[in-house]
Image (cartoon, helix red, strand yellow):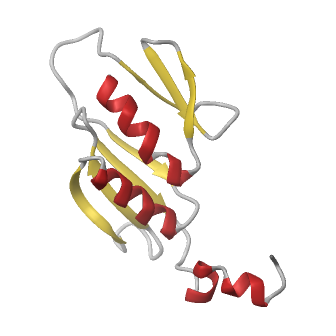
């Protein structure tokens, strides 16, 4: 669980989430004030069963940042960030394998912002900053 905790401490940050509760045997992550994703040591059952966990990202840039941080942390790349039109026309996701072997995804359901809005220039020009 130590490797997974270190992994999630870093890779959830671009999505706006962080470690909120830590009971030693279980750690809760989420956007404050409430955790909505928990990790814990396996205490029941035999062997391993892969899970697919998808985290909603606020933007495509956040999906890319999640992916970059995850890869820098040593995650195995399952699928690089891209549009997945078989899900829907603006489904933008990236998939990696966490230290425990789970399929972890960051997904944004919004269309790509114009380049000016991604850099902040669009907001400044519109007087929104």
Q: Is residue 125 positioned above or below 120 on the image? A: below
* Position in image of residue 94 (x %, y %): 34, 61
Instruction: Tell which residue pokes out farthest to the top in this image.
Output: 44
Query: Farthest residue in the right direction?
Result: 127
Residue at position x 44%, y 68% in the image:
91
Q: Is residue 101 left or right of residue 84?
A: left
Picture mark count? 0
Measuring from the top left, give residue 60's x and y in whole percent.
49, 69
Q: Looking at this rendering, what residue extends furthest in the left direction?
A: 47
Image: 32 above or below 113: above
Q: Residue at x 42, y 56 (%)?
A: 66
Q: Nearer the viewer, residue 33 or 111?
A: 33
Q: Quadrant of the C terminus?
A: bottom right
Determine which quarter of the picture holds residue 110. bottom right
Q: Percent x, y for residue 95?
A: 31, 55
Given residues 28 and 108, the one toward you in this image is: 28
Residue 42 shown left or right of residue 117 in the figure: left
């Amino acid at each position: 669980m130590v490797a997974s905790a270190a992994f999630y401490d870093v890779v959830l940050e671009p999505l706006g989430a962080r470690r909120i509760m830590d009971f030693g045997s279980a750690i809760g992550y989420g956007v404050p004030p409430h955790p909505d994703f928990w990790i814990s040591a396996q205490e029941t059952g035999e062997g391993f069963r892969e899970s697919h966990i998808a985290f909603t990202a606020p933007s495509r840039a956040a999906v890319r940042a999640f992916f970059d941080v995850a890869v820098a942390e040593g995650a195995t790349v399952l699928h690089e960030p891209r549009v997945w039109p078989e899900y829907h026309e603006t489904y933008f996701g990236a998939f990696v394998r966490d230290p425990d072997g789970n399929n972890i995804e960051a997904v944004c359901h919004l269309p790509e912002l114009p380049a000016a809005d991604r850099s902040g220039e669009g907001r400044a020009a519109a007087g929104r900053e």
